[in-house]
Amino acid sequence: MSAEAVTVQATKNHKETVVGPVVLLGPPGAGKGTQAKRISAHYGIPQISTGDILRENIEKGTELGKQSGALIERGELVPDELVEKMVTERLAQADCARGFILDGFPRTVKQAEWLDKHLAESRYFETATGGNRLVVVQLAVEYTKLLRRLTGRRTCPTCGHIYNANTSQRARVDGVCDIDGSALVTRKDDRDDVISQRLKNYRRQTLPMVNYYARKNRLVEIDGAADLDVITAAAVKAIENGDSL
């Protein structure tokens, strides 16, 4: 069998297997969104980003969007009951049947406990020995590097591609999307004052969740400052290990 045929077969197998569920953890700016898209493409499973869903609701003016919009602009977290309802509805959709990646949820121990209960009750991807194959990947990045990433982040409002004016991920033409030529924008939650509040929220509410998953032997920590391909390879390896974590 040729090398090309082996590659095609491997890709096909990746996109037929049951994956995860996968939870990506890390502070704002750690690269969760970028890695979620890469893992999603590798396995052919959806990236469930609570941040993206919330922003979509805000733009459409839904009831959820109205309730959460003001909180997000101040850098505050959306109440658990609203986020949990949104996640429940999203995971019930057909494209999640073989697996999914949660990007931006859970953010607190309470949400993590809710997710464990929801996965158990829904019997997502149970293994032969019982339980699910939940894999939690923590992207660790130093504080100063986070600030540099966040203050330089620019997003294409048309295709959603993310650039960074302070890193090697900058656009070829400053302020213009490489893909479709749209003018890049800075998200409201990437302003300096909001960034500070978001990082404080992370340290206070989300870091305890890292310990929660570590105690359950579900946590794999990866250097979020490494090369993108190195991070993706490490994440895929953790997912492939599954129950062996």
Image (cartoon, helix red, strand yellow):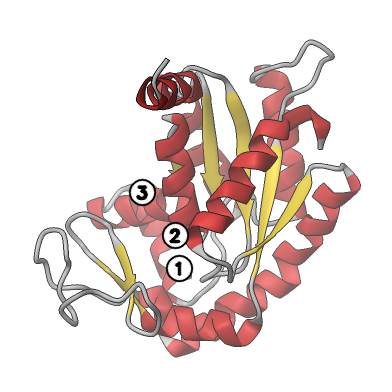
Q: Which residue is mark 2?
A: 68
Q: Quadrant of residue 133?
A: top right
The kind of residue on which mark 3 rests is Glu
Q: Name the disc covering residue 63, or none.
A: 3
**Mark 1 Cα shell of 10 Å, populated few (<14), some (14-19), many (≥20):** many
- Front position in the image: 111 or 140: 140
Label 1 vs label 3: CA separation?
Answer: 15 Å
- Front position in the image: 117 or 33: 33
Q: Position of residue 120 (x, y in %)?
A: 74, 23
Residue 136 visible in the snapshot: yes
Say whether disc 1 or disc 3 marks the residue closer to the N-terminus. 3
Looking at this rendering, what residue extends furthest in the front direction?
A: 2
- Picture quarter with the C terminus: top right
- Picture quarter with the N terminus: top left
Q: Quadrant of residue 94?
A: top left
Q: Quadrant of residue 216?
A: top right
**In the figure, 185 relative to 227: above or below?**
below
Q: Is residue 216 left or right of residue 123?
A: right
The kind of residue on which mark 1 rests is Ile
Label 2 vs label 1: CA separation?
Answer: 6 Å
Q: Which residue is mark 1?
A: 72
Q: Does the residue at mark 2 contact the one at mark 1 (Cβ under 8 Å)?
A: yes
Q: Residue at x 17, y 57 (%)?
A: 158
The kind of residue on which mark 2 rests is Ser
Please state which of the two labelled residues, at mark 3 or mark 2, is closer to the viewer: 2
